[in-house]
Structure formats: C-alpha cells, structure tokens
Amino acid sequence: MALNAAVEELAKRASAGDQAALNDLLKHIRPEVLNRCGRLLPCPEDAEEATQDALWDVTQGITRFKHDSKFSTWLYVVATNSARRKYQELRRRAAERPLSDTDPQPPNPRTTSVIAGSRVDLLDALERLDREHPELVTPLVYRDLCEMEYAGIVALTKLPLGTVKSRLHKARGLVRTWLSAS
C-alpha cells in the first residue's frame, strides 16, 4: 500500500481518539483497502464487502494500534484478514445452500461469486494450511500476501527471524505442492 506520512499522522491522531482524524483516515485508506481486497477476491461485490468489513475493523481497532510498526503494515494485515474471512464466509454459505429441484447440483466453486478468480486455489491452500499447520499461516500471509519486510513480520509476530524464515519456507513448500496437485 502506498500510504504516505500524512496518513500515518492521521492514524496517530485517530488512535488517540480524534474522530475527525478517523473519518479522514477512512476516506484516505479506502481505495488502498479495496485494492488489497480485490487482489484476493476477484468478484467486485465481494471485494467491496470485505473492504467495508476491513474499514469497520480499523474503526473498532484503531485505539489499540500501538505504533510499534507503521500504520500501513497494520492495515495490510487487517485488509488481508478481512478478505480471507469474506472468502471463508462465502464458501461456507455456498456449501450450506440447499439444493432445489431446478438446481440439483451444488454451485461450482470455480464459477460462483468469490470463488470465480485465479486466487481461489491460493485461498483454498491457505485454508488447508490454517487447518493442518496454523503456525505457518501468519508468516506466509504477511510476507507473500501483505508483502511485508522480514523486520515487520518479526516485530508483529515476536518470533526470531530464523523461525519466520523457516516457517515461511515450509509454508511455501506445502502450498506449492497443493497448488501443483490441483
């Protein structure tokens, strides 16, 4: 995300309780959040919903933002997690949808709403990774989806650099194997 120093300052003021700064901050970050969500959710309506959820999460969590890292780093995580939650929600809803007489087959997950794009296999792999090796998800999401530097990942996870790199390597290997098998 290409957020500038003015946005970082708005975030500081908003985290201190300045409502006007929060309103300005939300206006400034919305296009970047939508872009981030749209990279993971190819259906524009789904990306828009995830964006709204992410902005709500920012509104609710800004006072807990401690400025240990840049606001843009924190926002990467919020937006990415919002898109992942939206994807999981839509998959769950599609799976729970009862079949009708006119629609005897369940919807094809490759052609419906959130599941219509090229990032689907990656999101499926992330879900599997979260189920089977939850400790590997965070380094992979932060580095490969949020495009964070290692120093930022170390600061957020409180893990040693070697552990972050090791988990990232293992996560990439598993995901690569799963993606090539699909």
Image (spheres, helix red, strand yellow):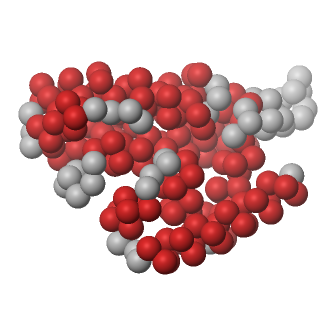
Could you tell me if residue 96 is visible in this image?
Answer: no
Q: Nearer the viewer, residue 161 or 180?
A: 161
Q: From the viewer's perspective, is residue 80 above or below residue 5? A: below
| Left-right relation of 177 to 27 | right
| Residue 18 sits in quarter | top left
Residue at image location 56% in from the left, 59% down from the top? 140
Where residue 161 sits: x, y (%)? 44, 73
Residue at image location 38% in from the left, 62% down from the top? 151
Q: From the viewer's perspective, is residue 88 above or below residue 171? A: above
On the rendered image, what quadrant is the N terminus found in? top left
| Left-right relation of 41 to 35 | right
Q: Nearer the viewer, residue 149 or 19?
A: 149
Residue at image location 73% in from the left, 32% down from the top? 117
Where residue 170 sits: x, y (%)? 65, 72
Could you tell me if residue 44 is visible in this image?
Answer: yes
Q: From the viewer's perspective, is residue 120 above or below residue 44? A: below
